[in-house]
Image: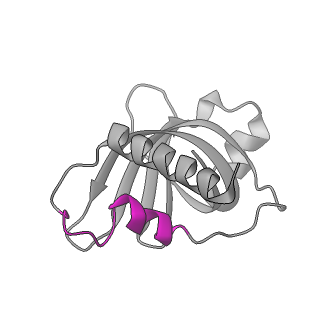
Amino acid sequence: MFVQGPYNFSDTPNGFGADLVRGRRSVNNVEITFVFDRNESTSDSARIEWLRGVRHLGCLLRVNKLERSLKGTLHIEATVLAIRSAHENLKSRMYEIGLYKSGLIGGPDEEEEFDVLAYENNLAQSIVASCDALGE
């Protein structure tokens, strides 16, 4: 998934010579976190300047784990595949409706584990139904 916005980068202690950093983005009751090695960045300026503090960036992420807290916050643990400067043509979007439809927020099955295959099947069926309704 691609997620854009302000990320908070904080150092993670490590005794193996890696420059580990935790990236975190939290919005609309969704928290995304990932850990990566700053030494694997493509430039010194990225390692020293861009991957520290709070930065408005776009991150391409591979989702590893989905969990919902008792307070309803969706926690996504991910592996970062790419980090880049924000793409200004992408506007903010509201994702809560999709989360409600998927059952990740507010459904009667709050205690059930998220089933990725069931979600993808439901999404595919919704797309087909929408196309049928449009006559396409």
Which residue is farthest left?
111
Q: Which residues are magenta?
A: 95-110
Examine the structure image and report whether residue 87 is included in the region drawn in magenta. no
Q: Toward the viewer: 121 or 45?
A: 121
Q: Residue at x 75, y 67 (%)?
A: 91
Q: 30 or 46: which is nearer to us?
A: 30
Above or below, 62 against 136 in this view is above
Q: Is residue 27 visible?
A: no
Q: How many marks?
A: 0
x, y percent for residue 86 = 76, 56
Q: Residue furthest front?
A: 135
Residue pushed farthest top?
Answer: 16
Q: Is residue 105 magenta?
A: yes
Q: Quadrant of residue 109?
A: bottom left
| Colour setting | one colour
Quarter-wise, where is residue 110 in the image? bottom left
Answer with left or right where residue 123 lies relative to residue 133.
left
Q: Residue at x 45, y 55 (%)?
A: 32
In percent of the image, x 55 and y 41: which residue is there? Answer: 61
Residue 96 location, x and y as percent?
48, 71
User: Is 37 located above or below residue 127 in the figure?
Assistant: above
Quarter where residue 46 is shown: top right
In the depicted structure, whether residue 22 falls above or below residue 39: below
97 with respect to 75 (left or right): right
13 sits to left or right of 96: left
Q: Position of residue 19 (x, y in %)?
A: 52, 35
Quadrant holding the N terminus: top right
Residue 37 shows in this picture:
yes
- 52 or 90: nearer the eye? 90
Vertical placement of 58 versus 73: above or below?
A: above
At 41% from the left edge and 41% from the top edge, which residue is drawn? 121
